[in-house]
Image (cartoon, rainbow, N blue to C red):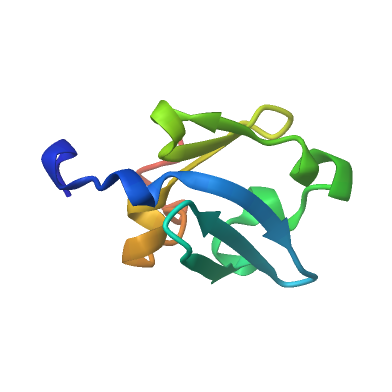
Amino acid sequence: MSISEIKPGERVKDVHFSEDSLSVDLIDGRTISVPLAWYPRLLHATAEQRKNWKLAGGGFALHWPDIDEDLATEGLLRGAPAPRKTMSNVA
């Protein structure tokens, strides 16, 4: 998705967690829910670490400073899990 395709309604309004999912409310009224298993850093984070999120990327992304995790609404809308580590990623 290019920058020109980003829609203002896709900005983050709020973030919620259940035991096994992440839900992101958008300002246009939609809610994106994804399995926490897709994002190991969030899955293994404490409740306090999960609550400590900040808006990033002009409101189109989220950042968790305690665990150095970043997610963009564009990737969440595409259903993109975190990249898996492969031998080429490990150096």
Residue 21, image x, y percentages: 66, 69
User: How far from the left and from the top, in percent, is residue 11?
Assistant: 42, 44
Outermost residue toward the front in this view: 28
Locate residue 48 relative to residue 53 in the image: left or right. Answer: right
Q: Where does the image place residue 32, in percent across and percent down from the top left?
A: 50, 66
Q: Residue at x 37, y 50 (%)?
A: 10
Residue 34: name its quadrant. Answer: bottom right
Q: In this view, does 55 lie above or below 2?
A: above
Residue 8 seen in this snapshot:
yes
* Drawn side of residue 12 relative to residue 7, left or right: right
Tag count in the figure?
0
Residue situated in front as seen by the camera: 30 or 45: 30
Position of the C terminus by quadrant: top left
Q: Is residue 82 above or below residue 61?
A: below
Between residue 89 and residue 79, name the one nearer to us: 79
Q: Residue, x 73% and y 61% (percent of image)?
A: 17
Is there any visible trace of residue 80 in the rendered image? Answer: no
- Return the x and y of residue 60 as percentages of the image width and height: 40, 39
Residue at 40% of width from left, 28% of height from top?
Answer: 58
Task: Locate residue 28: give its quadrant.
Answer: bottom left
